[in-house]
Image: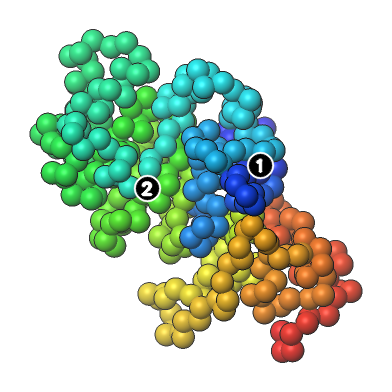
């Protein structure tokens, strides 16, 4: 049986924010997403998750720009496409769910008007058919079509996010890029939205890249997880492997920093220190100032991505071929 081909391939992608000192917010990211896959993209605030998402969708705004790499969607390099060519793909083939629905939705237009605008921008349709399609999409995400005449401020936070998902699904795209769509919701609304999104994915078959800083949120729903730190991807593995056997010290720190509702009670431990200033990243591994397993090589050379188990990847010298030649710098590690 032939191996499935990736729907999306990100190859050595780098994004910089210009200024007096340029900041490389995404640095050499490699990533593949397969049809129907749910990929969780996780990391602390300002680690480059959202920048990566907007680089993939070519929605970066100045002073951010892609300085190297490729984004291949069904074989087409999105980095090289002109805006007119991108419009043919956006919403039809891939779509984006923004972080803040109150900012993404127009406050002076009804939900129906905004759905109709999105449809009109990408196809010619009879007005009656377009209205019926708008009502159908609201039903699909669990909203009564009576709310088509509602304005965004008249909806709850969860309903606004569902309306955003309805808009993203208008043309049944193959890929949805979700930028922390649950960050402004309470835990009950978060769970409801995640269940709805996963059910829609099963029904329609689209792939998802879900950006979040909360590992526990996507732990139940993601097939694989990509962990980012300081603009780089530091670990990529199946969700079960990440939770059962995390490899990178940063991933281990993230898992120790949030409570589990199962098993014996354990003391929570935060990761000491703070993320580096990306204008002046540390030499060698970017996590070395905070790492409990730091070795001499970690402060000298940047680690590559190693594959300790199959297709999984980890950016850490602990899993590199020369690890036996390095002794830990910190006692007791």
Above or below, 125 against 72 in this view is above
Quadrant, the C terminus: bottom right
Left or right: 293 as drawn, with respect to 91:
right
Seen at 56% across and 21% down, the residue is 82
Q: Is residue 244 visible?
A: no
Q: Secondary structure at mark 1?
A: strand
Where does the image place residue 160, in percent across and percent down from the top left?
24, 44
Q: Secondary structure at mark 2?
A: loop
Where does the image place residue 166, in percent across and percent down from the top left?
29, 35
Above or below, 30 against 90 in this view is below
Q: Which residue is mark 1?
A: 13
**Which residue of the protein is positioned furthest toward the front in this rendering?**
20
Seen at 31% across and 21% down, the residue is 119
Above or below, 56 against 231 in this view is above
Q: Nearer the viewer, residue 230 or 160?
A: 230
Q: Which residue is mark 2?
A: 99
């Amino acid at each position: 049986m032939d191996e499935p081909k990736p729907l999306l391939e990100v190859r050595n992608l780098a994004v910089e924010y210009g200024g007096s000192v340029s900041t490389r917010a995404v640095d050499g990211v490699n990533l593949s997403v397969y049809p129907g896959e749910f990929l969780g993209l996780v990391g602390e605030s300002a680690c480059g998750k959202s920048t990566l998402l907007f680089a993939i969708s070519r929605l970066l705004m100045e002073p951010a720009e892609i300085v190297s790499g490729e984004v291949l969607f069904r074989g087409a390099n999105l980095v090289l496409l002109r805006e007119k060519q991108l419009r043919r793909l956006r919403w039809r083939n891939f779509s984006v769910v923004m972080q803040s629905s109150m900012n993404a939705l127009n406050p002076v237009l009804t939900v129906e008007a905004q759905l109709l605008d999105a449809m009109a921008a990408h196809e010619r349709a009879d007005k009656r058919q377009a209205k019926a399609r708008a009502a159908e999409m609201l039903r699909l995400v669990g909203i009564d079509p009576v709310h088509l005449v509602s304005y965004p401020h008249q909806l709850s936070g969860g309903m606004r996010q569902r309306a955003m998902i309805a808009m993203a699904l208008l043309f049944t795209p193959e890929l949805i890029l979700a930028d922390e769509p649950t960050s402004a919701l309470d835990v009950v609304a978060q769970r409801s939205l995640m269940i709805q999104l996963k059910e829609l994915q099963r029904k329609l078959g689209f792939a998802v890249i879900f950006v979040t800083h909360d590992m526990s949120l996507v732990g139940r729903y993601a097939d694989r997880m990509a962990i980012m730190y300081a603009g780089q991807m530091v670990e990529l593995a199946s969700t079960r492997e990440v939770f059962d056997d995390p490899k990178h010290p940063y991933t281990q720190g993230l898992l120790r920093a949030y409570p589990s509702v199962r098993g014996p009670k354990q003391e929570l431990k935060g990761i000491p220190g703070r993320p580096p200033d990306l204008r002046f990243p540390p030499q060698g591994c970017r996590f070395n100032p905070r790492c409990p397993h730091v070795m001499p090589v970690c402060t000298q050379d940047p680690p590559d991505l190693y594959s300790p188990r199959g297709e999984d990847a980890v950016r850490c010298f602990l899993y590199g071929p020369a690890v036996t030649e390095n002794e830990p710098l910190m006692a007791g590690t």
